[in-house]
Image: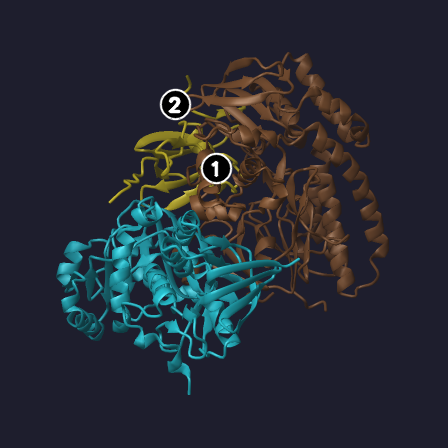
Chain colours: A brown, B cyan, C yellow
C-alpha cells in the first residue's frame, strides 16, 4: 500500500496541510504546483529579491502565512515537490504535466485536488479596458510584485476581500479613490448574527472598514456598476449609487470581483460530480463528508472544491488526507475526521453569513447591455448570448458555447461562465442551476503544441 | 402518462441529415416528428472538422456529394444562415510520387464532373502556398470545396424545419420501435407513443441498433475524431488541407483559430460521452508541424471529440430496409458525412414520399452486409 | 495622464533589467513578472484579436489567459506567470488581419 503513488495538485493552504498529514503517516506524496513557491494565492510569496516582511504582506494573517510556509519547508525532504508545473490534462489515472516547456505523463494511484479558486466576475461595459483587473489580481500586484494596479484605484464589487485589499493598498501608500460595495447596507446588518460566529475573522473585517472610514476613504453600499470610461485605458468609472443617482469617479484603475469560484477543471476531466450551491450561487464539487469526490481514489479540498476560505482550506486539506489514509487502511481516522468536520461546520455558519453580507449580485447579469463583451477571450457580447437562446434555442450554457463561442477561448469559460449562466437564466426565466456549467476540455490551460503533443510519454519513477 | 402522436413520418436522430429530411418533408406538407436523444447536431454532425469536401471521396459517393455541394451554397435561402460556409477550396497533399499518383488518378476519374481540380508539382505548389513546408511533394486543389461551422448546421436546419411545421423533440430517446400492420409504433423514454406510416433511421452511431429492431444488419463501429484547436493566429491558411491517406487535416477560420485533427478519440456510446486522447493526437500533431512549420510555437487551447458511426467498407448505408417496407436508413458516414448531410436529407424526403430517389442508391444498400 | 498602468509601491534596491517593447527600451526590476515589467512602462500588453483593442491582462494569477504576449521571435508567453529576463523584446502590435 505504501508504494502507491499519491499526488497532490496545488500547494496552497489545502495542499500543504494535506501533504503534512500524509508525511506524518509515512507517505511521500508528489506535489505539483503551478506557482514558483508554495502558499497558493492567499499566502502567495513574493520573489525573494523583494524583502518586505510578513506583516507588510499579509497583515493580520501574517502568522498563518508564516506557519504554512514553514510547514511546507519542513516537509521538503519528504515530498517530491515540483513547482512551476502545470497539470494540463487528466486521462483516467494519467496526469499530463508541463514543466519548463517539457511535457511528461505521470500515472497516479490516488489524487488530492487542491486547485484553488479565482475571482468571480460579472461584466460591465468597459471591463476589458486596460486598467480593469480582478480584486485578486489587485492583491497579487501588491503582494507578489509590490505594485498598485494604478495610481488612482477604485475598488468595486461584493467580497470580503473588498475592504481588505483597499486597506492594503491605502496602507501601502496607494491612492484609493473609493470602495464601492454592491451589497446594500441592510443586507450586511441582516447577516450580523451569523457573522458574529466568525469571531476574530469578523472583527478583523470591521477593523478594515473602520480604518478606511478614519482615513476618509469613501465606502459606498448598494451601488450598481455602470461603465468603465476611456478609449485606450481606464479614465473613470460611472456607477449608480444606492439612491439611484448616476455618479462618476475619475480613476486610472478599477479592481472588481464578486467573491470567488472554484478552479475545478481537472475534477471535471476526471468525471467528478458537481453540485450547485444556491447560497453562494456557485458550482462546487460534490464530496462525501470526508473530502472524497464521486470518482474513486480522487479527493478534493480547499477552495478548489467549495469556496470556504483559507482557514477552512487548511482543515479540508487535512481532512482529505485523513480520508485517504483511512482508505489505505492505515489505522482509523475517525477521531481526526470528526474533529475536523466539527471545525468545518462552525466555519460553514460564518461562511453562509459572509455570503449574505457580501452577496453575489446575480441580478446584475440581467442588466448587462447587449453590446457589452462577456467572453473576453472570444469577444462574445451579451447580445450574442441572448441571440443564441432566442434564435437557436440554446437551453444550457454548453449549447450557447457551441452556437456563439462564449467560453470557447483560451480561458475555457472560467471568467465568463457565471455571467453566461446568469444572462441565460434571466432570458429563460429559469434557475441558474439548471443551465449547467461549461464542460472542460483538455488542455485546462493553453499548452504549446510542439513540446506537448510530440514527445513520447515518459513515466517518472520515484 | 402516455402521449399519443400520429404523423406521416417519424425520424430518429437529429443530425444534419435528420433535420434536413424533416425540413424537406415539412415543406412538402407532410407531418413530421423528429426524436433526438440529446440536442440536434450534438454528435457527428456537430463535432466534426467542418470540411465541406468532395475532393478525394470514394467515387461512389460523388453523385451525392455534387448535389450536396449545390445545397451548401443555397443555405442562406434554405435555412436562413450560411453556417459560416466559405468556398475556400480543399488542398490535398502528397509526400511522394505514389501519393501524387493517387491525386492524379482522382483528378482523372472526375474529369467530367466540374469539380475544378488543379494539380500542383512541388515548385508550383510552393509558389502558390508559401506557408507550406518545402518537403511537401505535390498537391491537388479542389476549388469548389469549402468549410463551415459544424456546430451551426443541424441546429439551423432544425430551426427551419420547426418553422415549416415539423416537430423536433430534443432530449427524447426512442426506446423501441415496431411495425404493426401499416403503421410504425415508437415508444419514447418520456412516455410518448408515436405512430407513423414511414420511419427514417438517421441515428448516427446508434442507428445499427434501431436497424436491428427490424432485423436489418450493419456492422457499425462507433468512433470519434481527435480534434484540436489553437489560439487565434494571423490568418494565412486560406484553404482547407488534408493529406493522402488521411492522418492529418487542418483549416483556419478567419477569426484566426487553427482547427486540426487526426487519429481517433475516446468514445462511450452508452453514456454518450467522448473526448480527445492525447496519445492518439501525437502523430497528427507531428505531421502538422512538419507540413506547417510555423505552427511549432502555437498554443493549443482546446480538444474535443464526438461519436460517429463507421462501417467496414468506408461508405454509408442509405436506402430502404431489407425487411420492412416504409423504413429507410441513412447512417455510417465513416467520419465524412458532414458535407453529405444536406443531400441525404433531400434523398430521405424523396424516399419517404415516393419510395425512391433521383440519385441512385444501389451502392449504399444495407443488403451488402447480409450473408 | 500617466504613461504606465502599474505604480510601484516603494522598491528596495533591486538590479535593473532591460527590455524593449515595440522597439522602445525600458528598464524594469529583477523579480518583476513580464506583466509587471511591461505595465510599469506602458499601459497595455497586447492587442486583442477579437476587437482590435488594447488589453492589459485581468486576473494576474494565470487563469484568465488575457496576458499572452508575443516576443519578437514569435515565442508566446503568459506575462503574469513569466519572470522577466534581460533583453526580452516584446511586440504588442502582432497583426491579426482577418478575412480572406
Estimate how packed mark 1 is, as few (under 14), some (14 to 19) or many (20 or more) residues with alpha carbons within 10 Å.
many
In the picture shown, does residue A87 fall above or below A458? Answer: above
Res A227 visible: yes
Residue A428 spot, x, y in % from top left: 56, 39
Q: Is residue B24 left or right of residue A79?
A: left
Can you tell which of label 1 and label 2 is closer to the viewer? 1
Q: Which residue is found at the position 42% from the left and 70% from the top?
A: B329
Task: State which chain disc 1 sits on.
Answer: A
Considering depth in this image, is A310 or B337 the residue closer to the camera? Answer: B337
Q: Which residue bears the numbered disc 1? A: A386
Q: Quadrant of the C terminus of chain A?
A: bottom right
Residue B220 spot, x, y in % from top left: 45, 75
Task: State which chain disc 2 sits on.
Answer: A
Residue A118 spot, x, y in % from top left: 59, 39
Residue B303 spot, x, y in % from top left: 45, 56
In the picture shown, does residue A298 fall above or below A263? Answer: below
Kindly check if marks 1 and 2 are in contact, taking CB atoms under 8 A apart as contact.
no
User: Which of the 4 image quarters holds residue B137?
Assistant: bottom left
Res A24 visible: no
Q: Residue furthest bottom?
A: B371
Q: Is residue C68 left or right of residue B123?
A: right
CA distance for labels 1 and 2: 26 Å
Q: Which residue is found at the position 39% from the left and 45% from the top?
A: C76
In the picture shown, does residue B111 fall above or below A275? Answer: below
Q: Quadrant of the N terminus of chain A?
A: bottom right
Query: What kind of element bears circle 2?
Result: loop
Considering depth in this image, is C94 or A286 the residue closer to the camera? Answer: A286
As drawn, the label of residue A80 is none
Estimate how packed mark 2 is, as few (under 14), some (14 to 19) or many (20 or more) residues with alpha carbons within 10 Å.
few
Considering depth in this image, is B3 or B82 the residue closer to the camera? Answer: B3
Q: Which residue bears the numbered disc 2? A: A231
Amino acid at each position: 500500500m505504501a508504494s502507491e503513488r499519491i499526488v497532490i495538485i496545488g500547494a496552497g493552504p489545502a495542499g500543504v496541510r494535506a501533504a503534512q498529514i500524509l508525511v506524518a503517516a509515512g507517505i511521500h506524496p508528489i506535489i505539483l504546483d503551478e506557482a514558483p513557491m508554495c502558499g497558493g494565492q492567499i499566502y502567495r510569496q513574493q520573489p525573494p529579491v523583494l524583502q518586505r516582511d510578513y506583516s507588510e504582506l499579509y497583515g493580520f494573517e501574517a502568522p498563518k502565512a508564516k506557519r504554512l510556509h514553514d510547514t511546507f519547508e519542513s516537509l521538503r525532504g519528504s515530498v517530491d515537490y515540483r513547482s512551476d508545473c502545470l497539470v494540463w490534462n487528466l486521462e483516467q489515472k494519467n496526469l499530463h504535466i508541463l514543466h519548463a516547456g517539457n511535457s511528461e505523463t505521470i500515472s497516479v494511484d490516488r489524487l488530492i485536488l487542491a486547485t484553488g479558486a479565482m475571482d468571480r466576475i460579472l461584466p460591465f461595459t468597459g471591463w476589458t479596458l486596460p486598467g480593469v483587473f480582478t480584486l485578486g489580481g489587485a492583491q497579487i500586484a501588491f503582494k507578489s510584485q509590490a505594485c498598485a494596479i494604478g495610481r488612482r484605484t477604485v475598488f468595486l464589487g461584493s467580497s470580503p476581500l473588498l475592504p481588505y485589499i483597499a486597506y492594503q493598498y491605502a496602507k501601502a501608500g496607494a491612492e484609493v479613490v473609493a470602495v464601492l460595495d454592491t451589497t446594500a447596507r441592510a443586507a450586511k446588518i441582516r447577516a450580523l448574527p451569523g457573522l458574529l460566529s466568525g469571531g476574530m475573522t469578523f472583527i478583523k473585517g470591521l477593523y478594515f472598514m473602520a480604518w478606511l472610514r478614519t482615513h476618509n476613504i469613501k465606502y459606498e453600499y448598494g451601488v450598481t456598476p455602470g461603465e468603465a470610461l476611456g478609449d485606450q485605458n481606464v479614465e473613470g468609472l460611472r456607477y449608480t449609487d444606492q439612491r439611484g443617482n448616476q455618479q462618476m469617479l475619475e480613476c486610472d484603475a478599477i479592481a472588481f470581483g464578486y467573491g470567488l469560484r472554484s478552479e475545478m477543471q481537472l475534477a471535471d476531466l476526471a468525471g467528478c460530480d458537481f453540485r450547485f450551491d444556491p447560497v453562494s450561487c456557485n458550482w462546487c464539487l460534490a464530496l462525501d463528508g470526508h473530502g472524497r469526490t464521486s470518482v474513486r481514489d480522487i479527493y478534493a479540498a480547499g477552495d478548489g472544491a467549495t469556496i470556504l476560505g483559507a482557514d477552512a482550506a487548511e482543515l479540508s486539506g487535512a481532512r482529505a488526507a485523513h480520508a485517504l489514509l483511512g482508505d489505505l487502511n492505515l489505522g482509523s481516522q475517525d477521531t481526526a475526521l470528526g474533529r475536523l468536520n466539527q471545525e468545518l461546520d462552525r466555519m460553514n455558519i460564518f461562511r453562509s453569513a459572509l455570503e449574505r453580507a457580501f452577496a453575489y449580485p446575480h441580478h446584475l447579469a440581467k442588466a448587462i447591455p447587449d453590446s457589452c463583451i462577456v467572453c473576453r477571450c472570444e469577444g462574445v457580447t451579451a447580445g450574442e448570448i441572448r441571440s443564441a437562446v432566442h434564435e437557436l434555442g440554446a437551453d444550457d450554457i454548453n449549447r450557447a458555447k457551441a452556437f456563439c463561442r462564449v467560453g470557447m477561448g483560451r480561458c475555457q469559460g472560467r471568467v465568463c461562465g457565471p455571467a453566461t449562466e446568469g444572462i441565460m437564466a434571466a432570458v429563460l426565466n429559469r434557475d441558474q442551476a439548471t443551465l449547467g456549467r461549461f464542460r472542460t476540455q483538455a488542455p485546462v490551460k493553453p499548452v504549446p503544441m510542439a513540446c506537448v503533443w510530440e514527445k513520447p510519454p515518459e513515466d517518472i519513477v520515484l | 402518462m402516455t402521449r399519443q402522436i400520429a404523423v406521416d413520418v417519424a425520424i430518429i436522430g437529429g443530425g444534419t441529415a435528420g433535420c434536413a429530411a424533416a425540413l424537406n418533408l415539412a415543406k412538402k406538407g407532410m407531418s413530421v416528428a423528429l426524436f433526438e436523444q440529446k440536442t440536434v447536431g450534438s454528435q457527428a454532425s456537430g463535432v466534426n472538422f467542418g470540411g465541406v469536401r468532395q475532393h478525394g471521396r470514394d467515387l461512389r459517393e460523388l453523385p451525392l456529394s455534387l448535389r450536396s455541394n449545390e445545397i451548401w451554397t443555397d443555405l442562406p435561402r434554405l435555412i436562413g444562415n450560411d453556417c459560416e460556409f466559405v468556398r475556400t477550396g480543399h488542398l490535398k497533399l502528397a509526400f511522394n510520387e505514389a501519393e501524387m499518383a493517387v491525386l492524379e488518378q482522382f483528378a482523372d476519374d472526375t474529369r467530367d464532373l466540374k469539380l475544378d481540380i488543379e494539380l500542383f508539382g512541388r515548385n508550383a505548389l510552393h509558389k502558390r502556398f508559401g506557408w507550406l513546408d518545402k518537403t511537401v511533394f505535390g498537391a491537388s486543389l479542389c476549388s469548389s470545396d469549402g468549410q463551415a461551422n459544424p456546430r451551426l448546421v443541424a441546429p439551423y436546419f432544425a430551426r427551419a424545419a420547426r418553422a415549416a411545421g415539423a416537430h423536433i423533440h430534443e432530449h427524447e430517446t426512442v426506446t423501441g420501435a415496431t411495425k404493426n400492420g401499416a403503421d410504425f409504433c415508437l415508444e419514447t423514454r418520456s412516455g410518448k407513443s408515436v405512430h407513423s406510416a414511414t420511419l427514417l433511421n438517421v441515428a448516427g452511431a446508434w442507428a445499427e441498433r434501431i436497424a436491428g429492431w427490424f432485423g436489418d444488419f450493419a456492422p457499425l463501429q462507433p468512433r470519434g475524431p481527435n480534434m484540436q484547436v489553437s489560439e487565434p493566429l494571423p490568418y494565412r491558411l486560406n484553404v482547407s488541407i488534408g493529406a493522402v491517406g488521411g492522418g492529418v487535416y487542418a483549416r483556419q477560420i478567419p477569426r484566426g483559430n487553427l482547427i486540426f485533427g487526426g487519429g481517433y478519440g475516446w468514445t462511450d456510446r452508452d453514456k454518450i460521452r467522448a473526448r480527445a486522447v492525447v496519445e492518439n493526437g501525437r502523430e497528427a500533431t507531428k505531421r502538422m508541424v512538419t507540413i506547417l512549420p510555423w505552427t511549432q510555437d502555437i498554443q493549443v487551447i482546446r480538444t474535443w471529440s464526438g461519436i460517429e458511426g463507421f462501417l467496414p467498407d468506408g461508405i454509408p448505408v442509405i436506402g430502404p430496409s431489407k425487411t420492412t417496407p416504409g423504413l429507410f436508413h441513412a447512417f455510417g458516414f465513416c467520419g465524412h458525412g458532414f458535407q453529405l448531410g444536406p443531400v441525404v436529407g433531400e434523398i430521405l424526403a424523396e424516399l419517404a414520399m415516393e419510395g425512391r430517389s433521383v440519385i441512385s442508391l444501389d451502392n449504399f444498400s444495407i443488403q451488402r452486409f447480409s450473408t | 495622464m500617466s504613461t504606465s498602468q502599474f505604480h510601484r509601491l516603494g522598491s528596495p534596491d533591486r538590479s535593473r533589467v532591460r527590455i524593449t517593447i515595440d522597439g522602445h527600451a525600458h528598464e524594469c526590476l529583477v523579480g518583476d513578472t513580464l506583466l509587471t515589467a511591461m505595465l510599469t512602462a506602458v499601459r497595455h500588453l497586447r492587442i486583442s484579436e477579437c476587437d482590435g483593442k488594447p488589453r492589459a491582462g485581468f486576473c494576474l494569477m494565470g487563469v484568465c489567459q488575457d496576458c499572452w504576449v508575443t516576443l519578437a521571435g514569435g515565442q508566446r508567453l503568459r506575462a503574469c506567470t513569466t519572470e522577466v529576463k534581460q533583453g526580452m523584446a516584446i511586440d504588442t502590435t502582432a497583426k491579426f488581419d482577418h478575412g480572406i
